[in-house]
Image: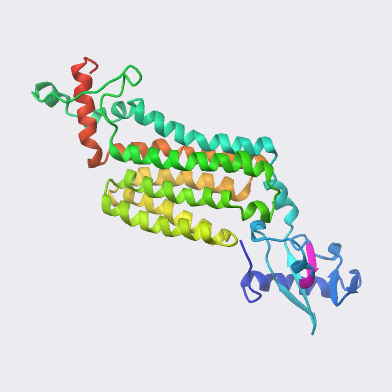
Amino acid sequence: MGWFSSTSPQSQRCDEELDSTLLEDEKKSTTTTHNGSVTVRNDSLPPKLTHVVSEEDLNSRDYTEDDGLLKKAFHRVNSSTSLIVLKDKDDYINRRTMTPLQERLNGFTMLVGAFYGSYYCFSGTWLWDNIDQVDLLALSSSSFSPNCGTSWLLQNLHATPPLPMIFIALGLVAHAPISFIYHWHYCTTLPPGKARFDHWSRKLDQAFIHVASAFVSYGTSGRWDFFAANVIFNAYCAWCTLVSTTATPVKTQLRILVSIFSYTSPLLQRDDMDTFLLAWFVIGSALWLFATYPIRGWSHAAFHLTIALLVPILMEAAGELPASQEQIAKAAHCASLLGML
Protein backbone atom coordinates (compact mmCIF):
# COMPACT_ATOMS: atom_id res chain seq x y z
CA MET A 1 0.00 0.00 0.00
CA GLY A 2 1.13 3.51 -0.61
CA TRP A 3 3.68 4.73 -3.11
CA PHE A 4 6.74 2.96 -4.44
CA SER A 5 9.67 5.07 -5.53
CA SER A 6 10.80 4.93 -9.13
CA THR A 7 13.94 3.08 -8.08
CA SER A 8 12.07 0.17 -6.48
CA PRO A 9 12.07 -3.29 -8.13
CA GLN A 10 8.33 -2.94 -8.71
CA SER A 11 8.83 0.33 -10.56
CA GLN A 12 11.71 -1.07 -12.60
CA ARG A 13 9.57 -3.97 -13.72
CA CYS A 14 6.82 -1.53 -14.69
CA ASP A 15 9.38 0.53 -16.61
CA GLU A 16 10.64 -2.53 -18.48
CA GLU A 17 7.14 -3.65 -19.42
CA LEU A 18 6.16 -0.17 -20.51
CA ASP A 19 9.41 0.33 -22.47
CA SER A 20 8.90 -2.93 -24.33
CA THR A 21 5.26 -2.21 -25.04
CA LEU A 22 5.82 1.30 -26.31
CA LEU A 23 8.59 0.11 -28.64
CA GLU A 24 6.64 -2.85 -30.00
CA ASP A 25 3.30 -1.06 -30.28
CA GLU A 26 4.56 2.38 -31.24
CA LYS A 27 2.63 2.33 -34.47
CA LYS A 28 -0.52 0.95 -32.88
CA SER A 29 -0.66 3.31 -29.91
CA THR A 30 -2.19 6.73 -30.03
CA THR A 31 -0.28 9.46 -28.24
CA THR A 32 -1.83 12.85 -27.70
CA THR A 33 -0.49 15.98 -26.10
CA HIS A 34 -2.67 18.25 -23.98
CA ASN A 35 -1.27 21.04 -21.84
CA GLY A 36 2.12 19.38 -21.82
CA SER A 37 0.82 16.00 -20.62
CA VAL A 38 0.99 12.74 -22.52
CA THR A 39 -1.63 10.01 -22.52
CA VAL A 40 -1.06 6.58 -24.08
CA ARG A 41 -4.05 4.65 -25.37
CA ASN A 42 -4.99 1.91 -22.90
CA ASP A 43 -5.25 -0.88 -25.46
CA SER A 44 -1.56 -0.54 -26.27
CA LEU A 45 -0.60 -1.68 -22.78
CA PRO A 46 -0.14 -5.12 -21.24
CA PRO A 47 -3.10 -6.35 -19.15
CA LYS A 48 -1.36 -5.55 -15.87
CA LEU A 49 -0.74 -1.93 -16.91
CA THR A 50 -4.30 -0.95 -17.61
CA HIS A 51 -4.24 2.76 -16.89
CA VAL A 52 -1.63 5.33 -17.85
CA VAL A 53 -2.01 9.00 -17.02
CA SER A 54 0.28 11.96 -16.72
CA GLU A 55 1.69 12.96 -13.35
CA GLU A 56 -0.29 16.22 -13.57
CA ASP A 57 -3.50 14.26 -14.19
CA LEU A 58 -2.82 12.01 -11.23
CA ASN A 59 -2.25 14.95 -8.92
CA SER A 60 -5.51 16.54 -10.03
CA ARG A 61 -7.59 13.47 -9.14
CA ASP A 62 -8.83 12.34 -5.78
CA TYR A 63 -6.60 9.29 -5.37
CA THR A 64 -5.74 8.26 -1.82
CA GLU A 65 -3.54 5.62 -0.26
CA ASP A 66 -6.74 3.86 0.74
CA ASP A 67 -6.83 2.44 -2.79
CA GLY A 68 -3.85 0.36 -1.79
CA LEU A 69 -2.86 -0.66 -5.31
CA LEU A 70 -1.57 2.68 -6.56
CA LYS A 71 2.04 2.21 -7.59
CA LYS A 72 4.01 5.03 -9.18
CA ALA A 73 6.49 4.24 -11.94
CA PHE A 74 8.11 6.86 -14.15
CA HIS A 75 8.73 6.36 -17.85
CA ARG A 76 10.66 9.15 -19.47
CA VAL A 77 8.98 9.71 -22.83
CA ASN A 78 10.96 12.87 -23.36
CA SER A 79 12.96 15.26 -21.24
CA SER A 80 9.90 16.95 -19.76
CA THR A 81 7.20 14.28 -19.39
CA SER A 82 6.69 11.47 -16.92
CA LEU A 83 3.99 8.84 -17.16
CA ILE A 84 2.29 7.37 -14.14
CA VAL A 85 1.44 3.68 -14.51
CA LEU A 86 -1.44 2.53 -12.32
CA LYS A 87 -2.62 -0.99 -11.82
CA ASP A 88 -6.29 -1.47 -12.47
CA LYS A 89 -8.08 0.22 -9.57
CA ASP A 90 -11.59 -0.57 -10.70
CA ASP A 91 -11.65 -4.21 -9.60
CA TYR A 92 -9.94 -3.35 -6.32
CA ILE A 93 -12.46 -0.62 -5.51
CA ASN A 94 -15.45 -2.62 -6.71
CA ARG A 95 -14.52 -5.52 -4.43
CA ARG A 96 -14.48 -3.15 -1.45
CA THR A 97 -17.56 -1.15 -2.32
CA MET A 98 -20.26 -2.07 0.19
CA THR A 99 -23.97 -1.41 0.33
CA PRO A 100 -25.60 0.04 3.47
CA LEU A 101 -26.85 -3.47 4.28
CA GLN A 102 -23.32 -4.87 4.09
CA GLU A 103 -21.93 -2.05 6.25
CA ARG A 104 -24.60 -2.65 8.88
CA LEU A 105 -23.78 -6.34 8.79
CA ASN A 106 -20.16 -5.33 9.42
CA GLY A 107 -21.36 -3.56 12.55
CA PHE A 108 -23.37 -6.54 13.79
CA THR A 109 -20.55 -9.01 13.21
CA MET A 110 -18.24 -6.87 15.34
CA LEU A 111 -20.49 -7.62 18.31
CA VAL A 112 -20.11 -11.41 18.05
CA GLY A 113 -16.75 -11.66 19.81
CA ALA A 114 -17.83 -9.26 22.59
CA PHE A 115 -21.04 -11.19 23.23
CA TYR A 116 -19.22 -14.51 23.31
CA GLY A 117 -16.52 -13.22 25.65
CA SER A 118 -19.13 -11.79 28.04
CA TYR A 119 -21.23 -14.97 27.91
CA TYR A 120 -18.18 -17.15 28.54
CA CYS A 121 -17.28 -15.20 31.67
CA PHE A 122 -20.71 -14.77 33.24
CA SER A 123 -22.29 -18.11 32.32
CA GLY A 124 -19.68 -20.03 34.31
CA THR A 125 -18.65 -21.99 31.21
CA TRP A 126 -15.01 -21.39 32.10
CA LEU A 127 -15.31 -23.66 35.15
CA TRP A 128 -16.38 -26.72 33.17
CA ASP A 129 -13.75 -26.06 30.50
CA ASN A 130 -11.05 -26.11 33.19
CA ILE A 131 -12.44 -28.61 35.70
CA ASP A 132 -9.74 -31.11 34.75
CA GLN A 133 -7.17 -28.79 36.37
CA VAL A 134 -8.84 -29.13 39.78
CA ASP A 135 -7.98 -31.87 42.29
CA LEU A 136 -11.54 -32.91 43.18
CA LEU A 137 -10.34 -35.37 45.85
CA ALA A 138 -8.52 -32.59 47.66
CA LEU A 139 -11.61 -30.40 47.48
CA SER A 140 -13.83 -33.06 49.04
CA SER A 141 -11.48 -33.47 52.00
CA SER A 142 -10.90 -29.76 52.51
CA SER A 143 -12.41 -28.04 55.53
CA PHE A 144 -12.14 -24.63 53.88
CA SER A 145 -15.52 -23.05 53.20
CA PRO A 146 -15.33 -20.54 50.32
CA ASN A 147 -17.60 -17.54 50.05
CA CYS A 148 -19.85 -18.80 47.29
CA GLY A 149 -21.93 -16.12 45.69
CA THR A 150 -24.77 -17.00 43.33
CA SER A 151 -27.85 -15.18 42.13
CA TRP A 152 -31.01 -16.11 40.28
CA LEU A 153 -29.63 -14.38 37.20
CA LEU A 154 -26.17 -15.98 37.32
CA GLN A 155 -26.96 -19.34 38.83
CA ASN A 156 -23.98 -21.09 37.24
CA LEU A 157 -21.47 -18.43 38.24
CA HIS A 158 -20.15 -19.82 41.51
CA ALA A 159 -17.23 -17.38 41.80
CA THR A 160 -15.86 -14.29 40.12
CA PRO A 161 -14.37 -15.25 36.74
CA PRO A 162 -10.56 -15.40 36.59
CA LEU A 163 -9.06 -11.97 35.98
CA PRO A 164 -7.29 -12.92 32.70
CA MET A 165 -10.67 -13.92 31.22
CA ILE A 166 -12.29 -10.72 32.47
CA PHE A 167 -9.56 -8.67 30.80
CA ILE A 168 -10.10 -10.40 27.46
CA ALA A 169 -13.84 -9.73 27.68
CA LEU A 170 -13.22 -6.10 28.69
CA GLY A 171 -11.02 -5.53 25.65
CA LEU A 172 -13.66 -6.94 23.32
CA VAL A 173 -16.50 -5.01 24.96
CA ALA A 174 -14.52 -1.75 24.81
CA HIS A 175 -13.86 -2.01 21.08
CA ALA A 176 -17.14 -3.50 19.81
CA PRO A 177 -19.50 -0.50 20.26
CA ILE A 178 -16.98 1.91 18.70
CA SER A 179 -16.66 -0.27 15.63
CA PHE A 180 -20.41 -0.88 15.51
CA ILE A 181 -21.16 2.86 15.44
CA TYR A 182 -18.54 3.45 12.74
CA HIS A 183 -19.91 0.75 10.44
CA TRP A 184 -23.61 1.20 11.22
CA HIS A 185 -23.82 4.99 11.11
CA TYR A 186 -20.80 6.70 9.58
CA CYS A 187 -20.08 4.18 6.82
CA THR A 188 -23.66 4.54 5.63
CA THR A 189 -23.83 8.34 5.80
CA LEU A 190 -20.35 9.56 4.84
CA PRO A 191 -19.36 9.50 1.16
CA PRO A 192 -16.64 6.98 0.24
CA GLY A 193 -13.11 8.27 -0.19
CA LYS A 194 -11.19 10.82 1.82
CA ALA A 195 -14.19 12.06 3.84
CA ARG A 196 -14.72 8.60 5.33
CA PHE A 197 -11.08 7.55 5.21
CA ASP A 198 -9.89 10.38 7.47
CA HIS A 199 -13.00 10.64 9.65
CA TRP A 200 -12.55 10.59 13.41
CA SER A 201 -14.86 7.56 13.76
CA ARG A 202 -12.58 5.43 11.60
CA LYS A 203 -9.51 6.56 13.52
CA LEU A 204 -11.27 5.81 16.81
CA ASP A 205 -12.22 2.34 15.58
CA GLN A 206 -8.59 1.61 14.73
CA ALA A 207 -7.33 3.15 17.98
CA PHE A 208 -9.62 0.93 20.04
CA ILE A 209 -8.10 -2.15 18.42
CA HIS A 210 -5.03 -1.18 20.45
CA VAL A 211 -7.15 -0.74 23.58
CA ALA A 212 -8.43 -4.28 23.09
CA SER A 213 -4.91 -5.58 22.41
CA ALA A 214 -3.64 -4.09 25.65
CA PHE A 215 -6.38 -5.80 27.69
CA VAL A 216 -5.90 -9.13 25.91
CA SER A 217 -2.16 -9.04 26.66
CA TYR A 218 -2.94 -9.60 30.34
CA GLY A 219 -5.46 -12.26 29.41
CA THR A 220 -2.82 -14.34 27.65
CA SER A 221 0.04 -13.72 30.07
CA GLY A 222 -1.41 -13.14 33.54
CA ARG A 223 1.54 -10.84 34.18
CA TRP A 224 1.21 -7.20 35.22
CA ASP A 225 4.65 -6.22 33.90
CA PHE A 226 3.84 -7.59 30.44
CA PHE A 227 0.46 -5.85 30.59
CA ALA A 228 2.11 -2.52 31.50
CA ALA A 229 4.55 -2.78 28.59
CA ASN A 230 1.69 -3.47 26.21
CA VAL A 231 -0.33 -0.57 27.60
CA ILE A 232 2.57 1.80 26.84
CA PHE A 233 3.07 0.45 23.32
CA ASN A 234 -0.62 0.37 22.43
CA ALA A 235 -1.25 3.81 23.92
CA TYR A 236 1.47 5.19 21.66
CA CYS A 237 -0.02 3.43 18.62
CA ALA A 238 -3.53 4.66 19.43
CA TRP A 239 -2.24 8.20 19.85
CA CYS A 240 -0.45 8.07 16.48
CA THR A 241 -3.66 6.92 14.83
CA LEU A 242 -5.83 9.58 16.45
CA VAL A 243 -3.60 12.60 15.84
CA SER A 244 -2.64 11.80 12.23
CA THR A 245 -3.95 14.36 9.75
CA THR A 246 -4.51 11.64 7.17
CA ALA A 247 -4.52 7.89 7.56
CA THR A 248 -1.42 5.90 6.67
CA PRO A 249 -2.62 2.34 6.00
CA VAL A 250 0.75 0.60 5.99
CA LYS A 251 1.89 2.10 9.29
CA THR A 252 -1.52 1.63 10.91
CA GLN A 253 -1.82 -2.02 9.88
CA LEU A 254 1.77 -2.76 10.85
CA ARG A 255 1.20 -1.36 14.35
CA ILE A 256 -1.96 -3.46 14.71
CA LEU A 257 -0.13 -6.58 13.52
CA VAL A 258 2.65 -6.02 16.08
CA SER A 259 0.07 -5.60 18.85
CA ILE A 260 -1.59 -8.89 17.87
CA PHE A 261 1.73 -10.72 17.81
CA SER A 262 2.54 -9.23 21.20
CA TYR A 263 -0.53 -10.61 22.94
CA THR A 264 -0.10 -14.03 21.32
CA SER A 265 3.62 -14.24 22.15
CA PRO A 266 3.07 -15.50 25.75
CA LEU A 267 1.77 -18.72 24.18
CA LEU A 268 5.26 -19.25 22.77
CA GLN A 269 6.88 -18.37 26.08
CA ARG A 270 5.08 -21.20 27.84
CA ASP A 271 5.71 -23.61 24.93
CA ASP A 272 2.06 -23.84 23.93
CA MET A 273 2.90 -24.13 20.24
CA ASP A 274 -0.37 -25.84 19.30
CA THR A 275 -2.47 -22.97 20.61
CA PHE A 276 -0.14 -20.38 19.08
CA LEU A 277 -0.35 -21.99 15.64
CA LEU A 278 -4.11 -22.38 15.89
CA ALA A 279 -4.47 -18.73 16.86
CA TRP A 280 -2.35 -17.60 13.93
CA PHE A 281 -4.22 -19.87 11.55
CA VAL A 282 -7.39 -18.00 12.49
CA ILE A 283 -5.62 -14.62 12.31
CA GLY A 284 -4.06 -15.50 8.95
CA SER A 285 -7.43 -16.60 7.54
CA ALA A 286 -9.01 -13.36 8.69
CA LEU A 287 -6.19 -11.29 7.20
CA TRP A 288 -6.56 -13.13 3.89
CA LEU A 289 -10.23 -12.17 3.78
CA PHE A 290 -9.32 -8.57 4.63
CA ALA A 291 -6.60 -8.35 1.99
CA THR A 292 -8.29 -10.09 -0.94
CA TYR A 293 -12.04 -9.51 -0.46
CA PRO A 294 -12.86 -12.82 -2.22
CA ILE A 295 -16.62 -12.41 -1.76
CA ARG A 296 -16.55 -8.69 -2.45
CA GLY A 297 -18.76 -6.57 -0.20
CA TRP A 298 -19.51 -9.47 2.13
CA SER A 299 -15.83 -10.12 2.82
CA HIS A 300 -15.49 -7.60 5.64
CA ALA A 301 -18.28 -9.20 7.65
CA ALA A 302 -16.65 -12.60 7.01
CA PHE A 303 -13.39 -11.10 8.27
CA HIS A 304 -15.08 -10.03 11.53
CA LEU A 305 -16.70 -13.45 12.03
CA THR A 306 -13.42 -15.23 11.36
CA ILE A 307 -11.43 -13.13 13.81
CA ALA A 308 -14.17 -13.78 16.41
CA LEU A 309 -13.11 -17.44 16.33
CA LEU A 310 -9.97 -16.30 18.13
CA VAL A 311 -11.93 -15.51 21.31
CA PRO A 312 -12.53 -19.11 22.51
CA ILE A 313 -8.88 -19.90 21.77
CA LEU A 314 -7.75 -16.98 23.93
CA MET A 315 -10.20 -17.89 26.71
CA GLU A 316 -8.91 -21.43 26.80
CA ALA A 317 -5.33 -20.16 27.01
CA ALA A 318 -6.32 -17.78 29.83
CA GLY A 319 -7.79 -20.68 31.82
CA GLU A 320 -4.41 -22.42 31.92
CA LEU A 321 -2.59 -19.49 33.53
CA PRO A 322 -1.46 -19.60 37.18
CA ALA A 323 -3.34 -16.31 37.63
CA SER A 324 -6.60 -18.15 36.90
CA GLN A 325 -6.19 -21.17 39.14
CA GLU A 326 -7.39 -19.67 42.41
CA GLN A 327 -10.78 -18.65 41.01
CA ILE A 328 -11.19 -21.94 39.13
CA ALA A 329 -10.52 -23.89 42.33
CA LYS A 330 -12.90 -21.66 44.31
CA ALA A 331 -15.69 -22.09 41.74
CA ALA A 332 -15.15 -25.84 41.69
CA HIS A 333 -15.33 -26.00 45.48
CA CYS A 334 -18.58 -24.05 45.47
CA ALA A 335 -20.02 -26.29 42.77
CA SER A 336 -19.08 -29.37 44.79
CA LEU A 337 -20.78 -27.96 47.90
CA LEU A 338 -23.93 -27.56 45.81
CA GLY A 339 -23.68 -31.16 44.66
CA MET A 340 -22.91 -30.23 41.07
CA LEU A 341 -19.66 -32.23 40.91
Q: Where does the N terminus fall, quadrant-wise?
A: bottom right
Residue 52 in the magenta stretch? The answer is yes
| Residue 216 spot, x, y in % from top left | 37, 45
Image-based side of 151 in relation to 181, left or right: left
Q: Which residues are magenta?
A: 51-56
Q: How many marks?
A: 0
Q: Is residue 170 above or below residue 246?
A: above
Image-based side of 47 in relation to 109, left or right: right
| Residue 34 spot, x, y in % from top left | 89, 73
In depth, the one of 290 and 161 nearer the eye is 161
| Residue 315 spot, x, y in % from top left | 36, 37
User: Where, by quadrant of the figure, is residue 179 drawn?
Assistant: top right
User: Which color mode does the image show?
Assistant: rainbow
The residue at 26%/24% (across/down) is: 158
User: Where, by quadrant of the figure, is residue 181 drawn?
Assistant: top right
The residue at 28%/35% (across/down) is: 162
The residue at 40%/28% (across/down) is: 119
| Residue 43 spot, x, y in % from top left | 85, 62
